[in-house]
Image (tube, rainbow, N blue to C red):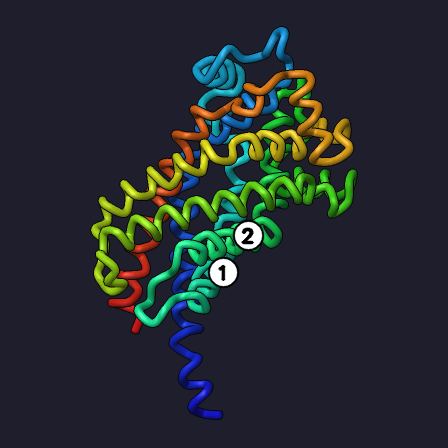
Amino acid sequence: MVQATSSSQPIQKKALKGIIAGGITGGIEICITFPTEYVKTQLQLDERSAKPRYNGIFDVVRQTVRSHGVPGLYRGLSVLLYGSIPKSAVRFGAFEEFKKRSVDANGNLGISQRLLCGLGAGVCEAIFAVTPMETVKVKFINDQQSAKPKFKGFVHGVGSIIKEEGLRGTYQGLSATIMKQGSNQAIRFFVMETMKDWYRGGDSTKPVNKLVTGGFGVIAGAASVFGNTPIDVVKTRMQGLEAKKYKNTFDCFMQIARNEGFFAFYKGTVPRLGRVCLDVAITFMIYDSFMEFFAKVWK
């Protein structure tokens, strides 16, 4: 019994380091990139194809700053900050757990294992962290479009949503979010692991330069954007204040296709591309840096 407990302690300590490093990483990353997330969400919520409210990225910024000042570009930031720790913990924790069970004798993942480990990490974070966080964030941003915004802050906003719609109100678009996060992490971790493996030449113990990691992150982020933006658009609509007009995720998809056309599924692609590429690059660079720092000071 003593031996089992002793051997499990390094694993538990590494998991705790991962949770803390992931939380710090998520907080820093979202503060840097949130305005692009705000602009992307506004463009995706703009359903009027005949006379859209916004003429493009810079028009969203201009109207927002004119109406609400620069802080308006950070509407909904608190929601993502509050959710960054559990999201990062679940994502990296799940991936490392799946990876530990899938690596070969040399510590490397096969091609299919890279996809499956990333997919599993994305599904876990969608269920346990991302869906409620994203739903509240989208409702906060959508509420700002109203003539008389009703959400006075994070606590008041979440309380109002739960009071009016129940706990289910924070889980709108679950299936779309699972599809989005699952495909997101499958693509990102697959690209990252593949490029790191190429850089290391098959030696899993060889360190990867941080700038190289950042470059790989940009490529992985771009691949995920072009791969699943249509799912992201559907998810955003399912989580908005007008989500009740959709029967389900499939009905939302069909209504967008019928009423707005194919290109509506790629609304917000440019701001999302900027945000996600920065997101993935910064996340992996900072996460790796903190894990290395903890390894030195936290024995």
Which of the pair 104/297 is nearer the observer?
104
Say what amino acid the circle numbered 1 marks.
Answer: Ala
Q: Is residue 144 left or right of residue 299?
A: right
Are there few (<14), some (14-19), or many (20+) residues within 10 Å of tag 1? many
* Residue picked out by circle 1: 94
Identify the element where label 2 is drawn: helix
Residue 16 visible from this viewpoint:
no
Vertical placement of residue 72 versus 278, above or below: above
Q: How many marks?
A: 2
Q: CA distance from mark 2 to mark 1?
A: 8 Å
Q: Could you say which quadrant of the image residue 142 lies in?
A: top right
Q: Is residue 85 left or right of residue 262?
A: left
Vertical placement of residue 62 versus 222, above or below: above
Q: Is residue 224 left or right of residue 206?
A: right
Q: Give me the residue at 51% from left, 37% from top.
A: 77
Vertical placement of residue 203 versus 189, above or below: below
Res. 11 mark: none
Are there few (<14), some (14-19), or many (20+) residues within 10 Å of tag 2? many
Q: Give me the residue at 21% from left, 61% from top.
A: 206
Residue extending farthest top: 51
Q: Give me the residue at 62% from left, 21% from top.
A: 145
Res. 125 mark: 2
Vertical placement of residue 91 versus 298, above or below: above
Say what amino acid the circle numbered 2 marks.
Answer: Glu
Q: Position of residue 94 (x, y in %)?
A: 49, 60
Q: Is residue 230 left or right of residue 290?
A: right
